[in-house]
Amino acid sequence: MHFQSPEYLVDRLDVIAELFDKDWTDVLVEAIRAYIEKTADS
């Protein structure tokens, strides 16, 4: 995935990814998928 993320978002993703021992892009993709699932049901 290639796009320019805001610095604060990347910083937060880095912290979350480190906590869960994952790559930050994986954390971002999971969050987007969860958001889509949640909003699709609305």
Image (tube, rainbow, N blue to C red):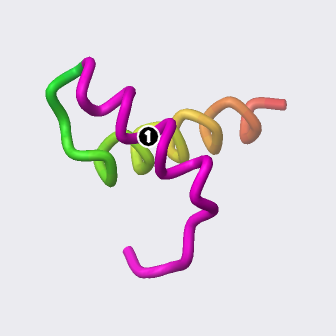
Q: Is residue 29 magenta?
A: no
The front one of 37 and 3 is 3
Q: Is residue 14 magenta?
A: yes
Q: Residue at 38% across / 27% down in the picture?
A: 16
Task: Give the labeled residue for mark 1.
Answer: 13
Q: Secondary structure at mark 1?
A: helix
* Quarter in which the C terminus is drawn: top right
| Numbered marks: total | 1
What's the residue type where badge 1 is placed?
Leu
* Residue lying farthest to the right in this orientation: 42
Instruction: List x then y, in percent, for residue 38.
Output: 68, 30
Q: Residues within 10 Å of mark 1 (few under 14, many from 20)?
A: some
From this view, report whether residue 30 is shown above or below residue 25: above
Q: Residue at 48% across / 51% down in the picture?
A: 10
Instruction: List x then y, in percent, for residue 20.
Output: 23, 21
Image side of residue 16 versus residue 39, left or right? left
* Quarter in which the N terminus is drawn: bottom left
The front one of 40 and 19 is 19
Instruction: List x then y, in percent, for residue 15.
Output: 37, 30
From this view, report whether residue 25 is shown above or below residue 40: below
Image side of residue 35 versus residue 16, left or right? right
Q: Residue at 63% across / 38% down in the picture?
A: 35
* Residue lying farthest to the top in this orientation: 19
Q: Residue at 61% across / 48% down in the picture?
A: 8
Instruction: List x then y, in percent, for residue 29.
Output: 41, 50
From this view, report whether residue 20 is shown above or below residue 37: above
